[in-house]
Amino acid sequence: MTQVQSGVIAYVYTSNIRHKERKQRIEFVNTIAVNAPVGAHKPPEESLDSRAKAVAAIAARHAAEVDAQSRFPQEAFEAAKTQRLLGVLVPGALGGEGASIARVADVCFRLGQACASTGMIYAMHQVKVACLVRHRHDSASIDGVLRRLCAEQLLLASSTTEGQAGGNVRSSEAAAVYENDRVTLERQATCISYGAAADGIVTTARRSADAPGSDQVLIAFLKEDYTLTQIQTWDTLGMRGTCSIGYVLRGNAPKGQVMPEPYESIHRRTMVPFAHILWGSVWAGVATAAVAKAQAFVRAAARKSGGQMPPGATQLGKAMYTLRTLRATLRDAMRRYESVMDDTKVLDSIDFQSQITLVKVEASELAVAAVLAALRVCGLSGYRSDTEFSLERHVRDILSSPLMINNDRILSSFTSTAMMAPIAGVLSE
Ligand SMILES: Cc1cc2nc3c(=O)[nH]c(=O)nc-3n(C[C@H](O)[C@H](O)[C@H](O)COP(=O)(O)OP(=O)(O)OC[C@H]3O[C@@H](n4cnc5c(N)ncnc54)[C@H](O)[C@@H]3O)c2cc1C
């Protein structure tokens, strides 16, 4: 890619009331999801967090098995569909909820704490939805795809990696071929997460056979529009539940499913900002879960030994401030993006592009540092796979973050921009 007292009796009372209200709200949402005509219910944004919590609880229950078997987190996504989490970014007029990126980032953060793969799959899906929503202009076909997505709670996968080109997202080899009112494409899609489980794939392609690799379009294929032939497996250190298998993707869809705007601007204005903020939110979730385990470990160890701290406890402070820095980095990027997301001039500026590009590098490095600090706190109990304080899965999962579009690729492509980017002279801005 070139680019955070009153009396005990009173506390217990209010806690019970809140619990009851929460339970009723979840039951209410479930009832609607099951009984309402498809697309008729648009749940309020306020309920998004409780719906995300319900899905996260299921994801957490199956996380170890998903990882061990390197399988798609089926149960979590069945729950996400029941809770209608897949279309939340889509405007209300098309059957969605018009949720903000910040609310979706909170869902990614919650899911990431429960199961890194579930969180990352949800994030990747929402990045693609954002591209369709924000760049569809007046395309009736893309409106149709989004309506179906909300009504049927379709899960969209992403194909940008092609052949041996790795994370060079801004170049495509396979070209779109137009015949009458159809577009066809055959691409060596060497990495499509949850490709087999998805209901659609949104892919980059060269605009036409005579266009340069950088002249790209984005095409939305739904399940009936493509076939996948497996060419590569996914047996990895972490993020095993993403099932990011390689395929030959053969697509054939109505021409209207080619996005009306060139991919170049979709990439700068939506793909990169949404990907970096939402991926970062998942990684922050993984780091939060690890730091919470480290804190619990220190408390338990101190209780057992009459208040004496375990040797790694000094690392807890480091883990906490790293996590705080990570959260601040993401919050800052999110606020900035939300404040300019409809201003193409600002979005295309060197200043904005530098910030949003570096957020991925910064967030991934901080997330790895926080998880490794948590591991130092827990010591052998964290290193082992068979203790309640095991951080084995968190370590394996988070190590994918600097590689998911290699940070060094991003930094090397940033060098010329860094030479031109303005350096702020005032601290408060
Ligand atoms: C958890 C996870 C999920 C992902 N999901 C998706 C997805 O859904 N869709 C998608 O499109 N991509 C996905 N990716 C892939 C991702 O987008 C990048 O393509 C990938 O991380 C490689 O990035 P990179 O090229 O910057 O890094 P690297 O892997 O460090 O570099 C790859 C480069 O190394 C060279 N290279 C690699 N292998 C060879 C070889 N055998 N022979 C010669 N040269 C070689 C090539 O020059 C290539 O450009 C996922 C990655 C991860 C970690």
Image (cartoon, rainbow, N blue to C red):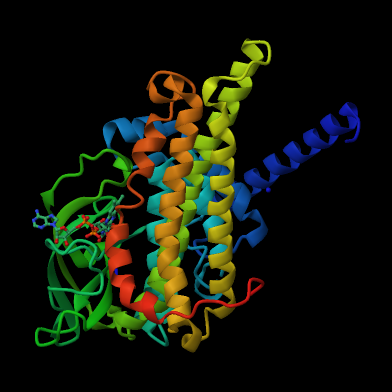
User: Where ligand 1 lies, by quadrant?
Assistant: bottom left
**Looking at the picture, how far across and down is residue 338, in whole percent?**
57, 73
What residue appears at the point 47 percent right and 71 percent down from the top-left corner?
Answer: 355
**Looking at the picture, how far across and down is residue 69, in whole percent?**
27, 32
Instruction: Tell me: residue 416, above or below residue 288.
Output: below
Number of labelled discs?
A: 0
What residue appears at the point 90 percent right and 35 percent down from the top-left corner?
Answer: 6
**Looking at the picture, how far across and down is residue 28, in whole percent?**
65, 48
Using the image as rendered, state which of residue 305 and residue 170 is in the foreground: 305
Q: Residue 248 occupies which quadrant of the picture?
A: bottom left
Res 250 visible: yes
Using the image as rendered, state which of residue 268 and residue 148 is in the foreground: 268
Asked if residue 323 lies left or right of residue 164, the reply is right
What residue appears at the point 16 percent right and 79 percent down from the top-left corner?
Answer: 213
What residue appears at the point 16 percent right and 53 percent down from the top-left corner?
Answer: 246
Asked if residue 221 lies left or right of residue 43, the reply is left
Using the image as rendered, state which of residue 212 and residue 349 is in the foreground: 349
Instruction: Tell me: residue 183, above or below residue 397.
Output: below
Q: Residue 309 occupies which quadrant of the picture?
A: top right
Q: Quarter of the image for the C terminus: give it.
A: bottom right
Asked if residue 247 lies left or right of residue 73, the reply is left
Q: Residue 393 occupies which quadrant of the picture?
A: top left
**Looking at the picture, how far across and down is residue 76, in whole percent?**
43, 42
Asked if residue 16 lies left or right of residue 36, the reply is right
For this orientation, the residue located farthest to the front is: 425
For this orientation, the residue located farthest to the top is: 305
Using the image as rendered, state which of residue 388 and residue 418 is in the foreground: 418
